[in-house]
Image (spheres, coloured by chain):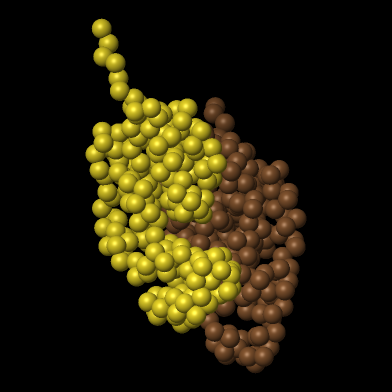
Chain colours: A brown, B yellow
């Protein structure tokens, strides 16, 4: 008369095949976790077919940033949750980059683990998120404080993000249906608010912090 | 009358504690490999005390880029090699970023493994490098071709790297003891050679490729 064991179905999304396979193998060695791993390009279809209870996403890589900006995180979690299902999002974050932390919060992540934490802490976090409990790594307190204090507005972040992609002032103006004078004003405000020396420096600072 | 088994001492350097611990645990499960892992800040002292036969370095992260630019890779391998010892450098590279690939080649890496490869391929590469044999992942052929074709000279890369850090033209001129006109000419050449729309775009392209 065996008791049926509850096994957590976990999907891990990370850019590097080498690292995600290694991490999934360490986590999957736990008796109560069944871990699969994939890249961003396969994340939605994999999530749909597997319907995991927990999705672990590394926020600290260019592919995740790009996906966040295109609003794909929400779609990914929705795919994972399936028909009336429910999937908890757990993110791996770099405590020194507040931008991805804020995007994870906006995507309603339930768990937050520092990328520098030992694997045991991630495993603990997975169990908590599977029980629909919030988990926030102690190391991330300061990061959250920083994330709450991004000095730029949504509009300014939009302008800066286009500038960082190499668009000229007139291209940005056309894209956002604004005048070139307005864009110049935005860029001046951005440079001032970020404490940058010039526009290129403002882009560098914002990329370092993970704001764009 | 047991035969003494040859065990490979391996040191793995990666920014994220979570990922390096997971990777070291998967590699260390092999009977002939003893794997330790650390961050860049501890890499030299750890290498000195441990004298590994093989050092695995993830080139595809900001800390490794910074260390490469400060010439620390060579010092790290020298520390690992110790007194008359000898340590082979094996790098994990992103096949789409030729810059770190070129820097690894300049640091005389013996092994090159794609970060998207399965762990088994890294383990095979570790054994080869421990025997002082070269190992180049099949997936990296095109990357090497690209790495050989970075269109900018050393001087241009120096100028661009300062510009990417947010320095103004006059600051770059002062730093390199050149006139502002010369710096303007360099920046114009860089923009043309990278096929960029403007200076910010040239910085973006060069960072994407991992040249600066």
Residue drawn at x 36%, y 61% as measured from the top left: B98
The answer to which of B129 and A52 lies nearer the viewer is B129
* Placement of the C terminus of chain A among the 4 image quadrants: bottom right
Residue drawn at x 45%, y 49% as measured from the top left: B71
* Placement of the N terminus of chain A among the 4 image quadrants: top right
Residue drawn at x 65%, y 92% as measured from the top left: A179
Q: Position of residue A210 (x, y in %)?
A: 61, 62
Q: Quadrant of residue B123?
A: top left
Asked if A85 appears above or below B172 in the picture, the reply is above
Q: Position of residue B164 (x, y in %)?
A: 53, 68
Asked if B96 appears above or below B135 in the picture, the reply is below
How many discs appear?
Answer: 0
The answer to which of B159 and B125 lies nearer the viewer is B159
Horizontally, residue A67 falls left or right of residue A103, namely left
In this view of the protein, can residue A210 be seen by the observer? Answer: no
In this view of the protein, can residue B84 be seen by the observer? Answer: yes
Q: Position of residue A31 (x, y in %)?
A: 52, 33
Residue at the bottom extreme?
Answer: A179
Residue drawn at x 26%, y 44% as measured from the top left: B135
The answer to which of B49 and B183 lies nearer the viewer is B183
Horizontally, residue A53 falls left or right of residue B28, namely right
Asked if B88 appears above or below B83 in the picture, the reply is below
The answer to which of B59 and B212 lies nearer the viewer is B212
Q: Position of residue B125 (x, y in %)?
A: 30, 41
Asked if A146 appears above or below B207 in the picture, the reply is above
Q: Quadrant of residue B155?
A: bottom left
């Amino acid at each position: 008369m065996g008791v049926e064991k509850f096994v957590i179905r976990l999907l891990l999304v990370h850019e590097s095949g080498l690292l995600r396979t290694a991490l999934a193998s360490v986590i999957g060695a736990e008796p109560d976790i069944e871990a699969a791993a994939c890249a961003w390009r396969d994340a939605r279809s994999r999530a749909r077919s597997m319907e995991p209870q927990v999705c672990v996403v590394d926020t600290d890589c260019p592919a995740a940033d790009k996906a966040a900006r295109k609003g794909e995180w929400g779609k990914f979690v929705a795919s994972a949750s399936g028909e009336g299902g429910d999937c908890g999002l757990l993110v791996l974050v770099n405590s020194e980059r507040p931008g991805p932390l804020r995007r994870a919060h906006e995507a309603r992540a339930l768990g937050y683990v520092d990328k520098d934490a030992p694997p045991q802490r991630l495993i603990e976090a997975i169990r908590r998120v599977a029980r629909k409990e919030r988990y926030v790594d102690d190391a991330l307190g300061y990061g959250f404080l920083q994330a709450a204090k991004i000095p730029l507005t949504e509009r300014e972040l939009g302008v800066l993000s286009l500038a960082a992609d190499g668009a000229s002032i007139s291209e940005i103006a056309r894209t956002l249906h604004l005048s070139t004078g307005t864009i110049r004003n935005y860029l001046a405000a951005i440079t001032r608010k970020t404490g940058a020396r010039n526009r290129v420096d403002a882009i560098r600072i914002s990329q370092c912090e993970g704001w764009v």
